[in-house]
Image: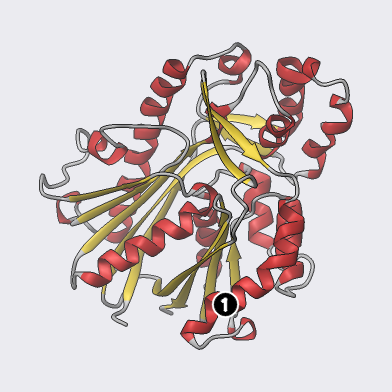
Amino acid sequence: MKPVSILSLATSTPGHDLPQSEAVAATRDLIGGQFADFDRLASVFTNAGIEHRQLAMPVEWYRRPRSFQERAEVYLEVAVDLFVKVASRALDEAGVRAEDVDTIVTVSSTGIATPSLEARAMAHLPFRTDVARIPVFGLGCAGGVGGLSLSTKLARATPNSTVLFVTVELCSLALRTEKAHKADIVSTALFGDGAAACVLRSGEGGFAQIGAGAEKTWNDTLDIMGWQAEPTGLGVVLNRAIPVFARREMHQAMIEMLEPQELAIDDVDRFICHPGGAKVVDAIEGALSLGQGTLVEERAVLRDHGNMSAPTVLFVLDRYRRRGLPALCVLNALGPGFTASSLTLRSAA
C-alpha cells in the first residue's frame, strides 16, 4: 500500500468546564425526581473515572427543556467554532495552508447541519472553492477511527493530495429533562463535548504512517447504542451491558481485524483505544490481555474530558504521540452498529 502520513493533530473543547461533583448535583436537580432509585443509579458518576468534562453551554442553559430548534442553533454555533479552531491548529502544525487542502472529511453525529460544518467553516478559512467535501453522520463513538480510516483511503487514492479530517461532537445537547430514561443518567455521567482534527497526506513524513483500517459489525445489536428521534431532538440509546459485550467479543474481533494485515495481537506494541467509560476500558484491557492499568492515557483523557464520542480517541492518540509512539500501534473504538473500528499506525520516528 502507498504510505499515508499524519502530519498533525489538534484537539479542542468548549470553554464551559463542569466538575463531576457538580454534574451529579445538576443531574439530581434536573431529572433526579423522575427516578425513585436515583441515589442508587447515581453511583455511575463516582464509578465513571471522570473528574471534569467540558460543555457546549453553561450548565444553567441545560436547566430547562430545550426545543429541537434551540439545540440545533447551539450545535451550529458551537460546532462551527470548534471546527475552525481545530482545523486552524492542525493546518498550522502541518505547515499547510487552507488553500492546499484537497479534501475535507467531517465526522459528527450529535447534530444536523445542512449545509454541513465544513461548508460553514469556509466563511472563516480560505479553502478552495473546488475542495471535495465529505460529511459523515452516524458513526458515533467509532467516528474518530472510522473517519480517519476513510480519510486515509481518500489520501491514498490520490497521490500527493492533502486531506483534512475534522470531528466535532456536542453530546451534551442530547440531554432530556422531560421523560428522562435511565440511559440519560448514564450518558450525563459519561459524556462531554470536544473536537479534533488531523492533516493527512500521501507519502512519508509527519509523526505516523497509517496502515489499513478494518471493521467488525455484529448482527442483532442495533439496540446497544445510538439515537432515537424525539420531538425535542435526538435521544440517547445506551445499553449498560457494553462493558460485558466488549470483554466477551473484542479479543476475537481484533484477531479478525488484524489478520488481513498478517498481524496478531502480540505484534502490537500499543493499543490506543476509545475510552467509552472506566468499565469499558477495564473490559478492553481484559479482552486484549493488556494487564490492568495499561491504558493509562485513555483513563487520563476520560478523567479530564469525559467521553466526547468520536474525537476522544484522537485526544488519546495526541497524548501518546507526545510521549513517543512505539513502532506499531492500533487505534480502536466501539460505536453504534454495534461496530468495532481499528486502524494500524507505524511510528515515523
> Within the image, what quadrant is residue 198 found in?
bottom left
Q: Is residue 76 left or right of residue 234?
A: left
Residue 108 location (% of width, % of height): 42, 42
Q: Please state the horizontal and vertical placement of residue 329, each as a whole percent of the image.
A: 53, 75
Residue 326 appears anywhere in the view: no
Residue 3 seen in render: yes
Residue at the image point whose x is 34% and y is 33% from the top: 80
Residue farthest toward the left in the current orientation of the protein: 129
Q: Is residue 300 left or right of residue 230?
A: right
In this view, the residue farthest toward the bottom is: 262
Left or right: residue 325 versus residue 44 is left
Across and down, in percent, residue 47 comes to 81, 44
Image side of residue 318 versus residue 60, left or right: left
Residue type indicated by callout 1:
Glu
Relative to 57, does residue 136 appear above or below in the rendering? below
What secondary structure is found at the residue carrying circle 1? Answer: helix
How was the colour assigned to the protein in this rendering?
Answer: secondary structure
Place of residue 191 in the rendered image (x, y in percent of width and height, measured from the top left): 62, 38
Q: How many marks?
A: 1
User: Is 254 or 169 nearer to us in this picture?
Assistant: 254
Return the residue nearer the eye: 91 or 331: 331
Residue lying at 33% horizontally and 71% vertically, measured from the top left: 5
Dot 1: within a 10 Å radius of its alpha carbon, few (fewer than 14), some, or many (20 or more) residues?
Answer: some
- Quadrant of the image containing the N terminus: bottom left
Residue 292 or residue 173, whichever sits in front = 173
Residue annotated with mark 1: 256
Q: Which quadrant: the C terminus?
A: bottom left
User: In the displayed image of the protein, which residue is found farthest to the top?
Assistant: 64
